Image (cartoon, coloured by chain):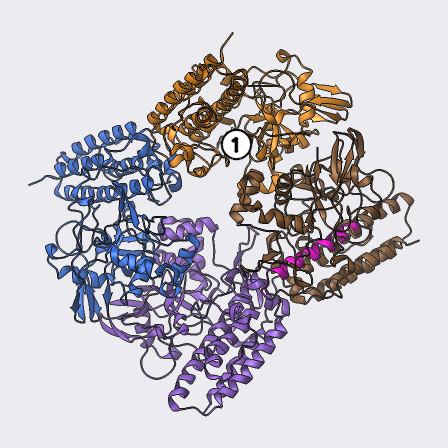
Chain colours: A brown, B orange, C blue, D purple
Amino acid sequence: MTTLAATFSAVRDGTLMLAQPLSDEDCCVQSMPDASPVKWHLAHTTWFFETFILERFETDFRPFHPAFRVLFNSYYEGVGEQHPRAQRGLITRPSLSEVRAYRRNIDQRMQHVLAMPLSEQVSKELAMLVKLGLQHEQQHQELLLTDVKHLFSINPLKPAYKSEELVSDQLQRKGVLPTLQWQEFEAGIVEIGHAGAGFFFDNETPRHRQFIEKFSIATRLVSNREYRDFIEDDGYQNPLLWLAAGWDWLTQQRLTQPLYWQKSTNQFDPTWTEFTLYGMRSIALDQPITHISFFEAEAYARWAGARLPTEAEWECAANAVAPQDGDYFGQVWQWTSSSYAPYPGYAALAGAVGEYNGKFMANQYVLRGSSCATPAGHARLTYRNFFPATARWQFSGMRLARS
Amino acid sequence: MTTLAATFSAVRDGTLMLAQPLSDEDCCVQSMPDASPVKWHLAHTTWFFETFILERFETDFRPFHPAFRVLFNSYYEGVGEQHPRAQRGLITRPSLSEVRAYRRNIDQRMQHVLAMPLSEQVSKELAMLVKLGLQHEQQHQELLLTDVKHLFSINPLKPAYKSEELVSDQLQRKGVLPTLQWQEFEAGIVEIGHAGAGFFFDNETPRHRQFIEKFSIATRLVSNREYRDFIEDDGYQNPLLWLAAGWDWLTQQRLTQPLYWQKSTNQFDPTWTEFTLYGMRSIALDQPITHISFFEAEAYARWAGARLPTEAEWECAANAVAPQDGDYFGQVWQWTSSSYAPYPGYAALAGAVGEYNGKFMANQYVLRGSSCATPAGHARLTYRNFFPATARWQFSGMRLARS
Amino acid sequence: MTTLAATFSAVRDGTLMLAQPLSDEDCCVQSMPDASPVKWHLAHTTWFFETFILERFETDFRPFHPAFRVLFNSYYEGVGEQHPRAQRGLITRPSLSEVRAYRRNIDQRMQHVLAMPLSEQVSKELAMLVKLGLQHEQQHQELLLTDVKHLFSINPLKPAYKSEELVSDQLQRKGVLPTLQWQEFEAGIVEIGHAGAGFFFDNETPRHRQFIEKFSIATRLVSNREYRDFIEDDGYQNPLLWLAAGWDWLTQQRLTQPLYWQKSTNQFDPTWTEFTLYGMRSIALDQPITHISFFEAEAYARWAGARLPTEAEWECAANAVAPQDGDYFGQVWQWTSSSYAPYPGYAALAGAVGEYNGKFMANQYVLRGSSCATPAGHARLTYRNFFPATARWQFSGMRLARS
Amino acid sequence: MTTLAATFSAVRDGTLMLAQPLSDEDCCVQSMPDASPVKWHLAHTTWFFETFILERFETDFRPFHPAFRVLFNSYYEGVGEQHPRAQRGLITRPSLSEVRAYRRNIDQRMQHVLAMPLSEQVSKELAMLVKLGLQHEQQHQELLLTDVKHLFSINPLKPAYKSEELVSDQLQRKGVLPTLQWQEFEAGIVEIGHAGAGFFFDNETPRHRQFIEKFSIATRLVSNREYRDFIEDDGYQNPLLWLAAGWDWLTQQRLTQPLYWQKSTNQFDPTWTEFTLYGMRSIALDQPITHISFFEAEAYARWAGARLPTEAEWECAANAVAPQDGDYFGQVWQWTSSSYAPYPGYAALAGAVGEYNGKFMANQYVLRGSSCATPAGHARLTYRNFFPATARWQFSGMRLARS
């Protein structure tokens, strides 16, 4: 059985491995306010353990560097001030090697804490926080990849994060999507949300009942080919397909395709290419569409005569499929029609760590499943990912539903 | 029994009566992009009848003025282009008297159409659209008042819309709020949404089942006194009480109180006043708080150890109270925690009129009940009003709930 | 001989006459922050006399309305606070008729003051301030017309301020421009700036010497025809013709022609029209180009192999031409290459009235001459008008020079 | 005698030496749109030689990397497109070491070209362009330091570029300023601008005559002590001291002191510190004020009962002082009251290199002299530096004048 200490090492090392193909410069820069520099991800995940665990469990706690408390605090008001989010990429000091030293120092101290003899109560509490920190680190592993992808995408040299051979299987092109079919579910009371053993975020609880009306859900994800047809049917030019806020956003930003798609300028051969972590590639038509916003997913669904599933519908359907028989996980996050809101009876964790999830429950939409960039073991049936309706730089795609 | 033609006249005249205390200048100006000039309200409600009824039912339809099709189209993409929303206040021509002439012309033609012999099917369809147009007009009657209030509030002369004696009973100060009590509801399946006879908007349907967990709801609205206590307990200075998006908005806008409140600058006598439709008044502490945003309502609830009700909880509770025994209607709209989303099985009306409600179902929150500015007869148990989380210029207040 | 009291009446009445074709609504609205509502012009010019003359010379001065001190203060920090410039158009109260009453009241009191027996010294001082106030009023008469023109231009109904027959001769189409010729001037010391009797603004003084190198100047203004050739030679698409700041502005604003020009959308008959105070008209090719910015004038000059004159060159040349033999005055203001700066030895007037001109001497360019909208008797050889390099809503055109 | 080839090596090496204390990360980031990353400076100066010399003089020219033509083009429209200025800091690839390789490659090829046998005419042309490129490189050496200073100043760790001992003498604290005296100049015709041998920028020509009225100029720069007195006399709170555009900028930006000054938060000991290239230091009261904008300099001068000199006055005065007897050079650039404009008869260089100076002649002000960061040998009596009126991150100070 794997000890928590071993898991800790494994997850922490995993983050460094993701940063391995990158130069100091690649790790320093922030391409947009939504994204963060890799160096900041490396430091912030470390800050999380230092702040929420070492500060509490070390007897003679001393911060690694007093300025890091502010520099690498993301948004925890309970911990104090934060460095302005949009200025994370201006921090050339501490250097990447200093941040690596910060990681080593905190890792050693964490191992020391994990080896301390503790009462069962305290030990349990510690384990809970360590697991939270590791799940947090895994979330940043995925963000690290999406943020690097965005950074490289706006570089005219279109650099590759890795060559296609070296990139992990996960991030490579998947096989062809099967024929779309509709799976029907009858109306009735279902239970959703986390229960039982295993890690979970507070926003997945409490498990509770919902009444769902009869619905059908697609047995597979929407493909690039299908989405291309939407584009070529003037989907981005027809306001009647869009939510009003989506149309305003679209016209203001002059959008005509998913985030990383490019149409060749040769009008006689208008092929589509897309930027990937291994460089520019022609669109693989039979793979799932990704890097679309909630607004784009919602408009596509209307065009296709369908709609997005609610998160309850999604969870109910995903629960009914054997993991090997569906593409609910490991390909693209799937937008749902559900606004991100507390479950009935929701209570945030106590203390500053309670700011983790709860305070973002406004003007965001829930995505379910997991993506090709989600670390192994991080996905969960009841997992609630959430982003604003315009976010596109995540591996976000869609699955259709209808009433 | 009142005929539709008589109702038509009554509602249309009601709008003109609301504009009666205002000068041509008052009616022309737009104080912010969210608000519209009174003249625009007068013209747009007329455009609605001209476009959706006369154009369809008049045999030799000719537009009153071809340019009005664009000028007074609010957001119906299916009808064509629209004059930019933020520039509605720059339209000094047509003049107010020309817009009044436009109203008279369309009203006469509407009466003619209403008097035409029609098949039962066509007659029913016409009646549906006329009722829709009248409900639409009533919505703009409320907006006219809130928009005038906003316009006058930013004028250093702080003009009154009417003197306190002349303002309708509705808009005057209400009696003292009773003691707050909590009414409990058991868990179970409830039905919400419109069913049966009577007018309704498409977004209130279909009536459908929801499972609600056990909850309690306050028997009365939150008062100015309670909200003042929140302010004086540094509610606007404590980030831990706020949703993250609310806190960002608050700090960027430097907000420290509800929209129309002012604190006297005399530090030894820090009394609160507020701007009303009859001028500046001292705060009536035992009346319901109003002109707060969703974010403020949500933060207040957290401070008070409670939460906002969902719209299903609200409808369930309002349904259980005799109209005369509660303050669910006629005082302030009440923010719910529910994001504005389609009910399961929702279908918009056919044609351009289908843009009325459906396309706004993103990034808005549902308010329930009705306000002191809502026209008599317009309120409904299943009515879903909606505004962005930062909107404050409506008569928006709150009622607490808890799990 | 005309008395000052009579001149006062004449100028003040002139302003009201300009407002005569306008409705209350037309007078209330502000079409952009650079422009002001007509009502504000009417009130501010009155405020000027009340603040700088009545407050000083009336023995028992009482303000007409205390709030007007702030509401109608344009930018005099020495007088106190100002209503925010961009919100001048939101002031529906006081009404236009109250502002007319304000004018009548101040005019009566001014006549009373003008009739008071005063010492010679005080009388002289009073006369100076009255003349300043009248020149100020005349400046606002021109602004009133340019601001109304802008307001009407963005109205889709394209209303006319007056019909072409009723508009003053001044504002009507002028005769054909003569052949362009170059007048040469030898190098040497010249004197520029005001000296002697007659009214002048402080910025025209002191008269001083400048050394001018040899130059030539065009005997007439640049025509619409010539400017159209620049446009059709892709002048707005060629960055090498533009100052860098001008090119940035141009591309950001997507400009391709002067402010009020419109190209017909019929690609087979691409005629140009322009908005005028008497409605849309086809371009009169042999009249002077107007409503261009400094950047456009400067780029046109480069395209034409010439340059803009300095203000010293302009004054020197204008001084050498008999008024009836040139078009230096009464058609369009002429951009010079001179940044608006103090003359050597410049001293602002004492007191708050000293803010009139001096504090604007940064990032603006000098225009010389006068326009078709300049009131009779207001133009002067040494007059220095000034606007930012991007301003286009004045009657601003150009005359070429070369070294 | 130093050959051009040797000078070339020396200047090019000088740039690398300035970058030597910096990490790859320090060199990659852009702290604001006005500043550029060090890596970009290193590459752009190289691009200048490649584009304007190698492309013309190499017989078989091949670009080092085709994408660099756009990436490192600053603003030369005649050369083609440019990478967006505000996104220079997002270019993590090419890496710093690739840019160093770029420099080595171009340097070798430049040495080869410099050693080629050429006709006298071609040789002269080459020499002119090489000298232009080296002066250009020296300008970027100064910018490199000011841009690094700005980057480090916004880092909460307040890193030092070098320790005080290692920083060049130039950048260290200077001796105490002498007593201020006024030197008088009589009215008359002077000649300004470059003439004779030696390098010059096109904007310094032609040498021409100006008439200057009698004036006095301060024998030394304004000191930190004097400027502190201005601050403590509420200079930043008094609108009457400021140009209107300066006051608007000031209040919008909430400025209360020069760019790098900080007031201690200890209200009982309100000492001033400033950020320098060797870290935070207490203000040296008897050294020249620096990092102030034109607006601040202009307001200070008004407060001090003086004014800024024109550039002609400055050049005339600087010309009259023995270099060792004044502080006209080598301390801080000195704002003049002169808008940056072409001298009479000015002609830009032919070709794309003509965009170097001429197209920026709008809305900028001339600074004269040179600063502690100006490379040795780069300063010149007739040198015209220019920045917008709000620029503060250069070593910009001031000298007083009066009429």
B297 relative to D163, above or below: above
Q: Quadrant of residue C302?
A: bottom left
Q: Is residue D325 left or right of residue B118?
A: left
Amino acid type at circle 1 is Ala
Vertical position of residue D331 compared to residue A127: above or below: below
Q: Can residue A66 be seen in this view?
A: no
Q: If the image is split into quadrants, where does the C terminus of chain D sit?
A: bottom left
Left or right side of A47 for D358: left
- What residue is drawn where x is 81% and y is 33%? A191
Please, which residue is most extreme toward the top here? B1
Judged by its main secondary structure, the magenta piece is: helix
Indicate the secondary structure of the residue bearing disc 1.
helix
> Can you give x and y, in whole percent of width and height, for residue B391 in the image?
55, 33
The residue closer to the viewer here, B303 or A148, is: A148
Q: Where is residue D6 in the image (x, y as percent from the top left)?
A: 50, 87
Left or right: A279 with respect to C177?
right
Q: Does the magenta stretch include residue A64?
A: no
Among all residues in the image, which is located at the extreme right? Answer: A1
Magenta segment: A135-156
Displayed quadrant of residue D214: bottom left
**Residue A260 placement (x, y as % from top left):** 62, 56
Note whether C162 is above or below B221 in the view shown: below
Residue sitting nearer the eye, D313 or B139: B139
Screen quadrant of the N terminus of chain D: bottom left
Q: Is residue B41 visible?
A: yes
Horizontal side of residue A354 vs B346, given as left or right: right
**Residue tagged 1:** B352
